[in-house]
Amino acid sequence: MVTGMKLEVRDLTVAYDRADVLMSVSLEASGGEITCLLGANGAGKSTLARAVLGLTVARAGTVLLDGEDVTREPTHRIVARGVGVIPEGRRVFPKLTVAENLHTGAYLVRDRSRVSARFDEVCELFPRLRERLTQLAGTLSGGEQAMLSIGRGLMGSPRLLIIDEPSLGLSPRFVKENFQAIRRVRETGVTVLLVEQNVHQTLAIAQRGYVLSGGRVSAAGTAEELKQHPELIAAYFGGH
Amino acid sequence: MDPGLLAQHAFNGLMLGVIYALVAVGFTLFFGVLDVIKFSHGDVVMLGAFTALAVSAGLTGAGVMSHPLVLLAMLVIAITLMAVVGALLARLLVLPLRGAPAINVLLITLMAGTVIREGVRLFYPQGSNPKPFPRLLPGGTIEIGSFTLRHDSAILFVIGVAAIVGVYLTLARTRLGLAIRAVAQDPETAAAMGIPLTATVLATFAIGSALAALAGVVNGLYYSEISFNLGLLLGAIGFSAAVVGGLGNVYGAILGGFLFAALQTIGAVALPFASAYKDVFAFAAVIVLMALRPAGLLAERSAERI
Ligand SMILES: Nc1ncnc2c1ncn2[C@@H]1O[C@H](COP(=O)(O)OP(=O)(O)OP(=O)(O)O)[C@@H](O)[C@H]1O
Ligand SMILES: [Mg+2]
């Protein structure tokens, strides 16, 4: 078991050029829970994930990890605190092999025996990766790339895992496998922030969630509460 | 043609190929991690050679007569200093221009190269004149028929090849190499994996510039003469070699270096009446090659970067 990291986002405002994408968004995610972030296309979910990682600079607001302000830290320092990332669009390194991709995920782990133990665990989680360790990641199928991206995000034994739309473009079977993998990760105590479009499956594995619409939090609560929430339906079918 | 003479030309070509490859790998590494052309690279080669010359003059002046010792000192100091210079150029001139058009980096490094070149000319004692470079390697030869292999050339060849192999292994097998390749392919995702971007870029520029220093010293030892403007031609050749091979592709740069040397050698052999035109011949051949394969020889694979 690991102690999950506490993520707190306070009054975060992000603007690209002129348009405000996030307006004073606050949320929390804590250990042993899957906190999901729902919202229509363009609602600002990925922007929030990027701002937490320092990939997009926030105009105002703070991001706290275990109570420490990391808002202005460079991405690699934030990640070094124990954050694993499964980015939107998978973003595997196409010309690195599967094994090399996994090793980038453990870049910050100096202890070789820990890396190889973790490597074996990830291969156990995704046996299809083990069969393809020397294949270039760019030649993997979409589903295999998704597994690789998840595996890579787990390689550093994160205490906070940020996942952005892992099931996009996958067949239902792969989606199910991926959701199971995420559920198992959270059972080990890791804090999971899950950005998803797939409302029903997400709320089935999440403990709590937030709905973004038009750059603001329009609904928040436990997964059970959100399942009943009219805002959620509005966010997906009624626009913003 | 007499096989001995042929072997002679072939070896000379290989020797030049090593020097060009050392320079070309730098261009391709810089382009790989930052998508920039660093035009001061040729002048860093020259500065490396002059640093080595200064070290040798200093040590000889201080009474150090042992050739291996002087050679070792000049290699270590020139390579280390140029690694620092390369990282500094990246920190001060290239990184601040991230996000600006690539042409700006090209221009600013072109000017930095001019500053380095003119600086050496002005401040190195009698810097405008060609300088004899000390012969520090054993001077014997091996004669096989009409083929003469100078010991010093053989040693330089081995040193150069070892450096190229070393860089290749660093990129392919080490943690730093993995970081460099990841940053070259997708800097944002690399950062999200915890890879420090700035440090990796600086390390890449240090490695490329260390190779440039080695190329400068090897060049000096091979020709026994250096001058403040040697970086102009070597820079142009290294750049052409990297482009012909497919910018961003390390194998391409190595291949391009040897190819350019082969073209020069063929030019020198085919145009014996005018071997001074061997560079013209080689550059003309490069132009034709570029017209035929605009993206470089390893084009399909060059998309993969490094
Ligand atoms: N670099 C950028 N420059 C300008 N606008 C941007 C940039 N990145 C995102 N945006 C805009 O910000 C808004 C939110 O984008 P974001 O990617 O956060 O949405 P999302 O909720 O993740 O959507 P999706 O579900 O489609 O992934 C969109 O309108 C998008 O066009
Ligand atoms: Mg998104």
Image (spheres, grey):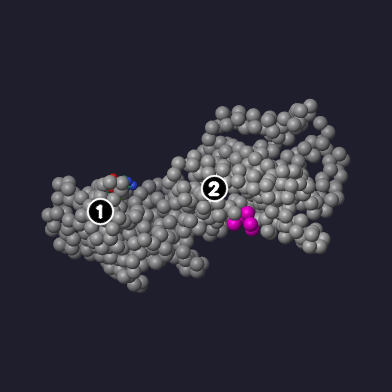
**Depth order, front residue of B296/A120:** B296
Q: Amino acid at mark 1?
A: Leu
Tag 1, which secondary structure?
Answer: strand
Q: In the rendered picture of this protein, how many numbered marks are placed on residues? A: 2
Quadrant in which residue B75 is drawn: bottom right
Q: Where residue B146 sits in the image (x, y, percent)?
A: 86, 39
Q: Is residue A20 left or right of residue B225?
A: left
Rendered residue at 60%/28% (across/down): B288
Of the 4 image quadrants, the one containing the N terminus of chain A is bottom left
Rendered residue at 42%/60% (across/down): A76
Please check the rendered image and state whether residue B87 is part of the magenta-colored stretch, yes or no.
no
Image: magenta residue range: B80-84
Numbered tag placed on residue A22 in the rendering? 1
The answer, for residue B131, to whether it is visible in the render is: yes
Q: Where residue A71 sits in the image (x, y, percent)?
A: 34, 62
Q: Residues within 10 Å of mark 1 (few under 14, many from 20)?
A: many
**Mark 2 CB within 8 Å of ligand 1:** no
**Depth order, front residue of B156/B226:** B226
The answer as to whether the residues below labels 1 and 2 share one chain is no
Q: Where residue A140 sits in the image (x, y, percent)?
A: 43, 48
Tag 2, which secondary structure?
Answer: helix
Quadrant in which residue A49 is drawn: bottom left
Q: Main secondary structure of the magenta part?
A: helix
Please check the rendered image and state whether residue B81 is part of the magenta-colored stretch, yes or no.
yes
> What residue does disc 2 label?
B30
**Depth order, front residue of A196/A205:** A196
Q: Amino acid at mark 2?
A: Phe
